[in-house]
């Protein structure tokens, strides 16, 4: 349902994505991992149509919603308003389905989103994305800054969404074990290129991934030094 | 005492028109972060146009409404130019609106000449707190209160109003959920045009307006809006009323020609007082 072919994205002179290809079938869960600055968020933003492609193409059949990096609340608005605005693209103002799925949000409805804890905001961000009834849910950093228990709960919600609604999920995740656990397929991005892709179980065994994520940071460290763009 | 009440009542009605202009500043700034200095021009255009239409025998109500609607369109055009390309800095846009207000002044001279106009309004007086008040001035107050209530309800209760608020609150997230932030900006400018136009058709019958009145109007409205931190309609209303009353008191007890200076001085004081809270907020 999602086809990314040879995608190049530039920020000015800096190349953030350098010929990325990735295909997702309907109802598939794919993890996107890689070091800081690899271009993961850029890829999600290109998929969501927020950053333009310099060349290559992104096509998606169906609706996309994103849970963005940093949660991106409307801080001075209520949780209810945040959620309702999530449905703007399809004019969906009915909260009942999302509140059924994320019952923790019910008692927070009237709270200002900016005053919530990180985990609560992440819940709102997910709920807001779900208001658009997406066929593909793109999530940037599910677990960042959250307690393990909260992460487990959110992961459970995602599994349910995927199983019950057939929502495809593209998950950017630094916690690689969580990513492998949740998504049958993984794509590894480094310095704007796909350096490995395949079944998560196989990648977990692979040399490159182990080097980058389970101890020896050699390769990823060098790459990071190369790709850092001066501010 | 009688004098004081007179100044108070006329000050409040005058302040209402400042607040109405100020609300235009607030609406645009809330949504786009732009300070729109063409805000006073809308009022002049509306006054000129209403006067012409009334002379052309269009009935009251219809003429004013048409003038106000035209200002809505003018507002959208001003917004289109001022918003520019995506990523244009609000300060650049501010300068653009200043330029546009001069352009409007020139256009007004071309179309209507340099003489002040004062279209007919409501005739007669009513007695309020023992003070004689023109009906027209009461109308200004009434319409202002209604307009503020409508704007407040629009922003807090309607889906579109929430999308407008969201565009200001977090433009990135707004784009993410599919809100066309630029279109929301244009809409805010159009709304500001309507509010400014409303102020024009309401004020002109009591205070004649000419092509050069826009700056004074914009300054008074801006001062009221600064009172509301350029974001709170409620406090802008209060700010406008305070400003109106303060101006009338100075005019009455000291000298009429100091009114603009009073507005500027008050604005300065408010800014100094507020800058502390701004600094405190920035520090967070
Ligand atoms: N708005 C921007 N302007 C300029 N350069 C940018 C911008 N956003 C990202 N970049 C650059 O593009 C590259 C990829 O950034 P991106 O945010 O996609 O990385 P990431 O994989 O999401 O990293 P992280 O794990 O830290 O979130 C980085 O080198 C970054 O400096
Ligand atoms: Mg990122």
Image (spheres, rainbow, N blue to C red):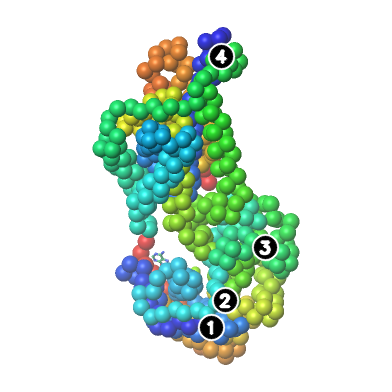
Compared with residue B271, is residue B130 higher up or lower down, i.e. above or below?
above
Compared with residue B44, is residue A25 higher up or lower down, i.e. above or below?
below
Which residue sits at x=34%, y=43%?
B97
Q: Mark 1 near mark 4, Cβ–Cβ under 8 Å?
A: no
- Check disc 3 and report the residue beneath it: A94
Single out the mark in the foreground, 3 or 2: 3
Judge: label 1 CB < 8 Å from ligand 1: no
Q: CA distance from mark 1 to mark 4?
A: 74 Å
Q: In this rendering, would B256 be left or right of B17? A: left
- Check disc 4 and report the residue beneath it: B131
Judge: label 3 CB < 8 Å from ligand 2: no
Single out the mark in the foreground, 4 or 2: 4
Q: Mark 2 near mark 1, Cβ–Cβ under 8 Å?
A: yes
Single out the mark in the foreground, 3 or 1: 3
Mark 2 neighbour class, 10 Å CA radius: few under 14, some 14 to 19, many 20 or more: many
Dot 2 lies on which element?
Answer: strand
**Numbered disc 2: what chain?**
A
Q: What number is the disc on residue A1?
A: 1
Q: Horizontal and vertical percent for residue A10?
A: 36, 71
Q: Are marks 2 and 1 on the same chain?
A: yes
Disc 3 or 2, which lies upstream in sequence? 3
Q: Horizontal and vertical percent for residue B150?
A: 58, 42
Q: What number is the disc on residue A136?
A: 2
């Amino acid at each position: 349902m999602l086809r990314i072919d040879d995608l190049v994205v530039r920020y000015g002179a800096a190349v953030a994505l350098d010929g990325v290809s990735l295909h997702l079938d309907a109802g598939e869960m794919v993890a996107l991992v890689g070091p800081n600055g690899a271009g993961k968020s850029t890829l999600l933003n290109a998929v969501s149509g927020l950053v333009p492609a310099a060349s290559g193409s992104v096509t998606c059949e169906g609706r996309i919603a994103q849970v963005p990096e940093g949660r991106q609340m409307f801080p001075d608005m209520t949780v209810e308003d945040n959620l309702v605005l999530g449905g703007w693209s399809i004019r969906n103002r009915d909260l009942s389905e999302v509140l059924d799925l994320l019952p923790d949000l019910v008692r927070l409805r009237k709270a200002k989103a900016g005053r919530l804890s990180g985990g609560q905001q992440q819940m709102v961000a997910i709920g807001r994305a779900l208001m658009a009834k997406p066929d593909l849910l793109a999530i940037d950093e599910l677990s960042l800054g959250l307690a393990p228990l909260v992460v487990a709960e959110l992961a459970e919600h995602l599994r349910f969404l995927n199983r019950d609604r057939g929502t495809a999920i593209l998950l950017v995740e630094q916690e690689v074990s969580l990513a492998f656990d949740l998504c049958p397929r993984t794509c590894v991005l480094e310095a704007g290129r796909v350096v490995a892709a395949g079944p998560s179980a196989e990648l977990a065994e692979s040399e490159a991934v182990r080097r980058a994520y389970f101890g020896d940071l050699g390769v990823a460290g060098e790459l990071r030094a190369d790709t850092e763009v001066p501010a | 005492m009688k004098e004081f009440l007179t100044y108070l009542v006329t000050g409040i009605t005058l302040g209402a028109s400042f607040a109405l202009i100020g609300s235009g500043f607030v609406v645009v700034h809330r949504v786009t972060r732009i300070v729109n200095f063409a805000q006073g021009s809308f009022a002049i255009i509306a006054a000129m146009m209403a006067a012409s239409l009334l002379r052309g025998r269009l009935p009251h109500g219809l003429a004013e409404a048409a003038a106000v609607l035209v200002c809505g369109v003018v507002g959208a055009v001003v917004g289109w130019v001022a918003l520019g390309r995506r990523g244009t800095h609000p300060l650049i846009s501010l300068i653009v609106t200043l330029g546009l207000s001069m352009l409007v002044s020139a256009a007004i001279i071309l179309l209507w000449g340099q003489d002040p106009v004062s279209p007919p309004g409501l005739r007669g007086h009513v007695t309020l707190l023992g003070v004689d008040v023109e009906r027209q001035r009461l109308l200004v107050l009434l319409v202002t209160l209604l307009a503020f209530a409508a704007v407040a309800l629009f922003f807090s209760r309607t889906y579109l109003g929430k999308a407008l608020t969201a565009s200001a609150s977090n433009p990135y997230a707004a784009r993410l959920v599919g809100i066309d932030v630029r279109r929301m900006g244009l809409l805010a400018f159009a709304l500001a045009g309507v509010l400014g136009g409303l102020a024009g058709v309401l004020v002109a019958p009591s205070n004649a307006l000419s092509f050069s009145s826009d700056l004074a109007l914009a300054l008074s409205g801006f001062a009221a809006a600064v009172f509301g931190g350029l974001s709170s309609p409620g406090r802008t209303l209060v700010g406008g009323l305070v400003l109106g009353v303060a101006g009338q008191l100075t005019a009455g007890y000291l000298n009429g020609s100091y009114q603009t200076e009073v507005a500027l001085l008050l604005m300065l004081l408010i800014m100094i007082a507020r800058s502390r809270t701004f600094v405190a907020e920035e520090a967070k």
